[in-house]
Amino acid sequence: MKYFTLLAPGRCIAQVAREGYPASRESNLQGRSFMKPRIRISIPILTCAAAILLTTRSAAQAPLSKPTSARAAIESILTMQQEAWNRGDVDAFLQGYWRSPELTFSGSTGIFRGWDRVKQRYKQNYPDRAAMGHLTFSGLEFHQLGPRAYLVLGNWHLDRASGDIGGVFTLVFQRFPEGWLIIHDHTSLVPAKP
């Protein structure tokens, strides 16, 4: 059985295997050279250890979900929000947001922090069904930021009797144990072209 000496200071495993472990310059009274202590590891043990490390590392880096299933889950949240909005149900619309004081919303009137503050903003700006109008999302782009995060870009449009409005949005979704939720929303109004 072949053994490798495990690592002399400043040497890699391949050097040690090729050249052997360096002997000390000191010698004992019998003329034998002293060698630093060796740790012997067999090739099968070394191979098994490497396989375990690689498997563990691969499993740790594997995404929690395939991009297509993540995208489908996020699209279903956006569809649910659009349907809730069009029923006039702001509370159901907000189910897609992370219910946390760390949720952020950026818009033309400033930055709002926390789920309660974002809810208050929506209720103030859209007090009734007429103000809410009919919402449509379009031009959606999905960009995976990591195994637990997506950036979604898109356009929004409200058809209203008082006048249509629309604009663009950037949403950051994060995957939580309960599913994908919006942790940041940046929505801007884009004035209609004359």
Image (cartoon, rainbow, N blue to C red):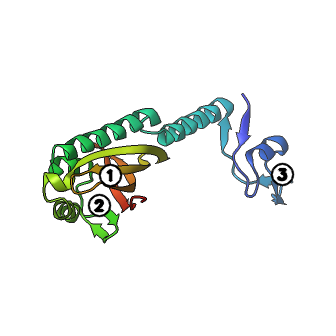
Task: Name, please, the residue furthest toward the bottom.
Answer: 110
Q: How many marks?
A: 3
Q: Quadrant of the C terminus?
A: bottom left
At label 1, which amino acid type do we have?
A: Ile
Q: Residue at x 34, y 65 (%)?
A: 106
Task: Tell me which label, 3 or 1, sits earlier in the chain.
Answer: 3
Left or right, 108 with reference to 58: left
Task: Tell me which label, 1 or 2, sits earlier in the chain.
Answer: 2
Left or right, 27 with reference to 144: right
Q: Which residue is mark 3?
A: 32
Disc 3 to disc 1, C-alpha distance: 71 Å
Q: Which x, y percent locates residue 184?
A: 35, 58
Task: Tell me which label, 2 or 3, sits earlier in the chain.
Answer: 3
Q: Which residue is mark 2?
A: 103
Q: Which x, y percent locates residue 16?
A: 78, 46
Q: Where is 173 relative to 101, above or below?
A: above
Whether label 1 touches label 2, CB < 8 Å: yes
Q: Which x, y percent locates residue 8?
A: 73, 53
Disc 1 to disc 2, C-alpha distance: 8 Å
Q: Residue at x 30, y 71 (%)?
A: 109
Q: Name the quadrant containing residue 66.
A: top left
Q: Name the quadrant containing residue 119.
A: bottom left
Q: Residue at x 36, y 61 (%)?
A: 189
| Tag of residue 182 | 1
At label 3, which amino acid type do we have?
A: Arg
The secondary structure type at the circle numbered 2 is loop
Depth check: give the residue in front, 128 or 191: 191
Tell us which disc is closer to us: 2 or 3.
Answer: 2
At label 2, which amino acid type do we have?
A: Leu
- Classed neighbour count for the residue bearing mark 3: other residues with Cα under 10 Å, few (<14), some (14–19), many (≥20): few
